[in-house]
Image: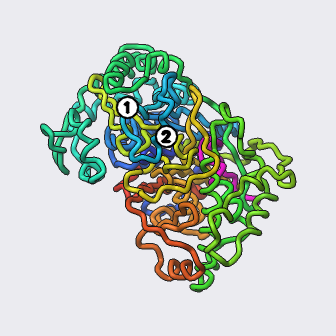
Amino acid sequence: AAMSTGKVCCLVLLTLGVLAVAVTLAVLLAQPRCGPQQYLHGAVAADTESCSLIGRNILKSGGTAVDAAIAGLICTSVMNPQSSGLGGGVIFTIYNASTGTVEVINARETVPRVFPHDLLSACATGFPIGPRWIGVPGELRGYEEAHRRHGRLPWKALFEPTIKLLSEPLVISPVLDKMLRHPAFSAPGKSLCPLLCDGQRFLKLGETFRWRALQQTLQAVAEHGAAAFYEGQIGMALVEDVRKAGSSLSMEDLQAYKAEVSSALNITLNNHTKVFAPGPPMGGAVLMFILKVLEAYKFHKAPLATPEEKVETYHHIAEALKFGNMLRPHMRDPAFSEAQVPVGTILSDQFAEFVRQQIDTRGDHPLSHYNLLESLYNDKYKSMGTSHISVLAADGSAVSATSTINYPFGSFVYSNQTGIILNNELADFCIANRSIKPDELVSLLPCLEPRGKNNISASALGEKPPSAMVPSILISKSGDMLVIGGAGGGWIISATTMAIINKLWFGYDLEHAISAPVMHTQGDSVLFEEPFSREVRTGLLGRGHKEKKYILAMNVVQGISKEGKCISAYSDKRKLGKSAGY
């Protein structure tokens, strides 16, 4: 009888290309009282309201969390074309309530067969855009794999709402307008003129454009599946266009592309909350390492009571971020990397304790202090544990997904015949050389990361580059859930970590957990997002932390939380996002 009163609660979250979907089954015997911005059945938080509504409607029409995630991402590629699309890659973290397993589908771009061997020597010489940096797009193979494993609605139904959007003129949004007016884009952006210009002039806020080529592409993929792209007419037209532009991408590359399915990494925090996220080459191990180091400080609302305690708390966070962000370049693709960093060690209690011992009251340690590579290979921190997944009292399924074409507008190569903007994902191999920041506007960041000794030469055919993307799912013993992920390149891990700390340990509500100003580290310096607390900033500088000014931060986090029967969803206002629910 209890089952018949069950209602399905579905949550979907999307951003820059970030999308988290949590579907929860709640047995509503008594109508619980939830807040005004909370939902009982389902919610979607996308970076635009149109995509939130499309995802929500998919849930309402009986779609699964994965169905809603895919439909929301297809919409996002049209509403925020600078961020994600069919010319990019995607990663899903999917929690299946009926089996209690969490899997990762990695459909990030890979290295094409033919690739300029001197490519990475260009890492430090400016802006890695243009045809040479295009990786093999994985987006549609990722959707196909996720839908095959977890979808319920017909494939075509996931494309129809966006195809319909494209039959009307599209409007230049404030976010797109800001990007087009940015000085970094005025020169390279001209290659997007067939789509976003009136003659040679970029369209302005509120002006409209048509994207007929993309509408036809989506129509073909909706009818004939991902094969239309990887083996058919769409792929051929795309390859013809990008080769004309100077890329070496071939039909063989498209035909050989495969999405990979693996188990998610997981840790348990405070003996209570399981955290699931993708392992290398994604950023999940780094996010978990930072949380693991901070767990023993037992943060709660109290440590923020006095100015001194506040500074002490944020000092610990800043130091953990410095250690974590230094590990990020070493997250190589395990299928291709001999020198695989031992993830079991990174996430072990012994190693977290060792790192905590390196954190004192000072913020002025030299960069070398934060390099953990030698200690990682020290036998005494070897982890005996293997990671296994066991989820108790799970009451619903969840999906967290991140999709990107890397830099805003990717490589700035536009395929006129297909309407697809191509990624510049190979630039992410530069981070292994440590000469540039991944997913970030390099030309705006003269402050390049210090070069490490380990200049790893990229990169094998089919290898997936390292990334800061961390689509994550947290589930507590009582069945409460947080589905969260971020966009914005090098800032992703810092922003997502801080949102989790704010929600899990400081007890903020979801909106404040995400909207609170972020602190980020680069090398041994700290960057503060405005309007970060002056007293904390002054206190940290007083401890010797070096401040670095950022030119453009792109951190955007979307989150959904479920506590008891009540669902909250929040889309980051930094990107003017808005959620929808029912």
Q: Residue at x 35, y 22 (%)?
A: 243
Q: Is residue 332 visible?
A: yes
The residue where tag 1 is placed is 131
Q: Position of residue 331 (x, y in %)?
A: 63, 44
**196 to the left or right of 396:** left
Q: Dot 2: few (<14), some (14–19), or many (≥20) neighbours within 10 Å?
A: few
The residue stretch that appears in magenta? 271-287
Q: Quadrant of residue 303?
A: bottom right
Q: Which mark is residue 340?
A: none
Tag 1: amino acid: Pro
Q: Considering only vertical position in the picture, is 574 above or below 119? A: below
**40 to the left or right of 421:** right
Q: Position of residue 115 (x, y in %)?
A: 48, 27
Q: Considering only vertical position in the picture, is 164 above or below 578? A: above
Q: Residue at x 67, y 31 (%)?
A: 335
The residue where tag 2 is placed is 121
